[in-house]
Image (cartoon, rainbow, N blue to C red):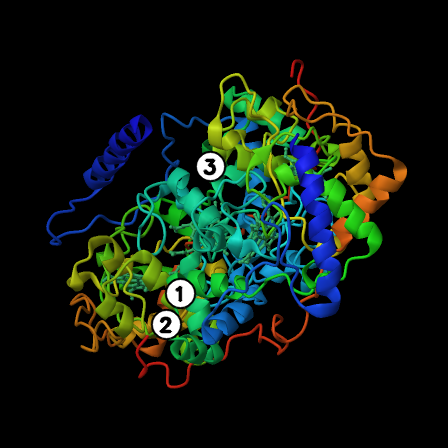
């Protein structure tokens, strides 16, 4: 409880400073794109080399999960943009996920994590990833017990957190600290915004103008992350795979059942109502968090359900004024955001915009996989 | 005193038994201490058939790798032949898999007796326990709903739509069909050695004070001084599974403990005098269920009997009534012959085993968008 309080004050601080940059009021004006600074570090989870080293190992370690098969990295592959390169992420064995795996690059800046914003920080996100039935499917007591039987972890946890035995809550802290090292900034867009006018090509500069003007991307993709971190229904088309893949149908029903909807909705829903799970307001159905545009060059496919395979498809979708789904066409509700209108971009303008989007990505971040330590029997206690 | 009167009655009983075997082929009626055939339980055939399919279906485990039958195998009277059980992948078991024969007539379940309500709760425990099947019941329900065979079977069984609640009813209905039958003891066809063994069992060896009733157990816990299985503490994957279990059960000082505390988790005596008590198991079907005891420390029935003959093992909490029995080698063999005579039919035919293939993939629901979930 104490930790939570501290954290929320901290996040408040971030909100205020972000707001101070632009003139973010009542939708009239929005903050401009600005270079990305350093990620906020929560006061109760300071960074240290030992901690991020431990966090990295844990990120790679499948023993933080049910059957010791599925680590964070399994669905957040460095060579797949630190996500998973399929429309729907792979799942825990025996399952498939129901959403696209997000990149963990720059997740450290996000006030709300997941497509529908259900976790408030990296620290809170990690346990729900490790425990969810279609992700890690682990249980705290088993995972915590496993850590105790890995001498190298015992030593590292002791060094970092000062406990005799590893605590599972500290494992999430270490992972969060590691994620705070997965930062990609100083991209061509950042450099350009910081004054290096050569950082973007002429085509990209044209794209940026469209982004801020005619294409109106800036109304949602704004600020340092190119995301207002609010929720909109763009009419992203529903997942075709649900029509003909039994395993995906199982997960779909499981998710709506487990996340909690009325009996009536459970029967009717055929698409992911997104932010509705959190607000329970019908007007929020089909809304998802504005995706940050950084690093997207490496994170195809796009959108919460991987509906689009390249950035050009995405831009064409916007050019058509977005799309339709069960929550825009009245099947369940009619919540399409009024902010999307056909844009009338020419073929060339579409390409310009795509070229600009690519400027958000910079160099691909690769790290060496850590070596994972083995289990060992516990030494006999001094007294028994 | 008691011993003598037992003996007396036994002679009459055996005499009756002898006649019985020629005259009334079928049940021995004159068992001591409530011993006798286990009554068959009436079940709803459709519910039991559904429970049978569920029992053999790997989709009931989180990663679809194991079913109940992975550990409870029909050929071994629903045990697995291992000293310490397997577990959900990523963990390893720390106890011996008990037989499920006559589980329905028990008063409590598990080696420590930690469930004392009903088989519905036991089933839930097996399905959801992290190191057994690690299944989120909500996911299980949706998996089952995806299988048209189940949808039909649930409906025909009167359960309506598949739900995790009815899974927890159907499996117990199947478990109720696992009743011991046709042992030499029940049929009255025991050998002379087995009959002598039965005399000792009720008399000099005093086994029946705990192994009483049709199922040869009083369902109560005792400390017999069974030695610890060192494998649990030497193999980190077993030890950590015990730690996870013990943490959940609130065992004090769990990281420094190197023994299975048994029924202590229920009574939590401050002086620890309840540490090492385990529930008296059934003695039926022992032929198929080696190795023995809560931790599989004994490979053969002869080893068990000689353990008892020595007065059990070394343990400061050992039941004080456990004394050396002074049985001769021959008497010990007779006792083993009797124990073997308590084993009957192996329930490995279609009546108790789901023989059809259960698809491991999921067919898509046709016309998905139009069909209600």
Mark carried by residue A255: none
Picture quadrant where residue B103 is located: bottom right
Task: Give me the residue at 55% from left, 66% from top.
Answer: B177
Determine if residue B342 is in view.
no
Q: In the displayed structure, would residue B362 be above or below residue A251? A: below
Chain letter of the residue beneath label 3 in the structure image: A
Check if mark 1's residue and mark 2's residue have beta carbons within 8 Å. yes
Q: Position of residue B172 (x, y in %)?
A: 48, 61
Q: Label 3, on which residue?
A: A172
Relative side of B149 to A235, left or right: right
Mark carried by residue B166: 1
Q: How many numbered callouts?
A: 3
| Residue lying at the far right of the rendered structure | B329
Chain letter of the residue beneath label 2 in the structure image: B
For label 2, count other residues whose C-alpha is less than 10 Å away and answer few (under 14), some (14-19) or many (20+): some
Q: Label 2, on which residue?
A: B159
- As helix, strand or loop, the secondary structure at mark 2 comes to loop
| Residue lying at the far bottom of the rendered structure | B367
Relative side of A45 to B188, left or right: left
Q: Position of residue B29 (x, y in %)?
A: 62, 58
A349 vs B219, nearest the viewer: B219
């Amino acid at each position: 409880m104490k930790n939570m309080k501290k954290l929320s004050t901290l996040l408040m601080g971030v909100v205020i400073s972000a707001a101070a940059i632009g003139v973010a009021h009542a939708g009239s004006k929005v903050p401009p794109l600005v270079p990305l600074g350093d990620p906020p570090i929560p006061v109760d989870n300071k960074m240290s080399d030992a901690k991020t080293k431990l966090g990295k190992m844990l990120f790679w370690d499948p023993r933080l999960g049910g059957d010791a098969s599925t680590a964070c990295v399994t669905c957040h592959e460095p060579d797949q943009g630190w996500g998973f390169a399929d429309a729907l992420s792979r799942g825990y064995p025996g399952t498939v996920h129901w959403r696209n795996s997000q990149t963990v690059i720059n997740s450290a800046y996000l006030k709300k994590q997941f497509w529908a914003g259900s976790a408030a920080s990296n620290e809170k996100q990690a346990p729900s990833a490790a425990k969810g039935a279609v992700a890690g499917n682990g249980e705290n007591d088993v995972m915590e017990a496993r850590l105790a039987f890995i001498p190298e972890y015992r030593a590292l946890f002791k060094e970092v957190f000062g406990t005799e035995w590893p605590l599972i809550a500290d494992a999430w802290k270490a992972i969060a600290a590691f994620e705070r090292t997965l930062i990609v900034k100083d991209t061509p867009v950042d450099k350009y915004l910081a004054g290096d006018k050569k950082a973007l090509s002429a085509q990209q500069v044209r794209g940026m103008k469209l982004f801020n003007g005619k294409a109106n991307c800036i109304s949602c993709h704004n600020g340092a992350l190119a995301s207002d971190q609010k929720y909109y229904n763009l009419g992203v088309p529903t997942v075709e795979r649900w029509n003909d893949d039994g395993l995906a149908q199982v997960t779909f029903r499981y998710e709506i059942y487990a996340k909690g909807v009325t009996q009536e909705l459970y029967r009717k829903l055929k698409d992911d109502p997104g932010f509705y799970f959190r607000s329970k307001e019908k007007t929020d159905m089909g809304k998802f968090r504005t995706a940050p545009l950084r690093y997207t060059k490496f994170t195809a496919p796009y959108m919460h359900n991987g509906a689009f395979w390249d950035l050009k498809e995405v831009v064409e979708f916007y050019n058509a004024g977005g799309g339709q789904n069960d929550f825009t066409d009245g099947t369940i509700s009619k919540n399409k955001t009024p902010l999307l209108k056909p844009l009338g971009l020419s073929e060339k303008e579409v390409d310009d915009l795509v070229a600009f989007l690519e400027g958000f990505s910079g160099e691909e971040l690769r790290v060496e996989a850590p070596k994972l330590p083995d289990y060992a029997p516990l030494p006999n206690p001094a007294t028994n | 005193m008691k011993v003598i009167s037992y003996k007396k009655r036994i002679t009459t009983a055996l005499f009756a038994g002898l006649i019985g075997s020629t005259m009334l082929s079928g049940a021995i009626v004159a068992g001591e201490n409530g011993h006798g055939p286990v009554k068959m339980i009436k079940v709803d055939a459709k519910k039991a058939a559904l429970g049978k399919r569920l029992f053999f279906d790997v989709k009931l485990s989180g990663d679809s790798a194991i079913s109940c039958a992975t550990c409870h195998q029909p050929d071994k009277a629903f045990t697995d032949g291992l000293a310490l059980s397997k577990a959900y992948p990523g963990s390893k078991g720390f106890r011996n898999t008990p037989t499920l024969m006559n589980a329905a007539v028990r008063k409590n379940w598990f080696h420590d007796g930690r469930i004392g309500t009903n088989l519905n709760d036991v089933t839930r425990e097996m399905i959801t326990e992290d190191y057994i099947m690690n299944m989120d019941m909500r996911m299980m329900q949706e998996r089952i709903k995806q299988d048209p065979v189940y949808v039909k079977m649930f409906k025909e069984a009167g359960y309506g739509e598949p739900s995790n609640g009815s899974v927890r009813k159907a499996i117990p209905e199947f478990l109720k069909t696992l009743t011991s039958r046709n042992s030499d003891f029940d049929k009255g066809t025991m050998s002379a050695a087995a009959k002598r063994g039965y005399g000792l069992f009720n008399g000099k060896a005093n086994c029946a004070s705990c192994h009483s009733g049709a199922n040869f157990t009083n369902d109560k816990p005792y400390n017999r001084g069974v030695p610890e299985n060192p494998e649990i503490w030497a193999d980190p994957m077993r030890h950590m599974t015990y730690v996870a279990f013990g943490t959940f059960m609130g065992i004090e000082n769990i990281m420094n403990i190197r023994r299975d505390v048994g029924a202590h988790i229920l009574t939590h005596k401050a002086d620890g005098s309840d540490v090492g008590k385990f529930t008296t198991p059934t003695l039926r079907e022992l032929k198929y269920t080696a190795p023995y005891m809560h931790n599989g420390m004994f490979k053969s029935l002869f080893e068990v009997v000689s353990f008892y003959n020595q007065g059990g093992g070394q343990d400061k909490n050992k039941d004080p009534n456990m004394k050396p029995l002074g049985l001769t080698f021959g008497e010990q063999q007779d006792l083993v012959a009797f124990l073997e005579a308590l084993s009957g039919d192996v329930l490995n035919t279609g009546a108790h085993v789901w023989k059809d293939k259960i698809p491991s993939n999921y067919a898509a629901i046709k016309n998905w968008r139009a069909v209600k979930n």
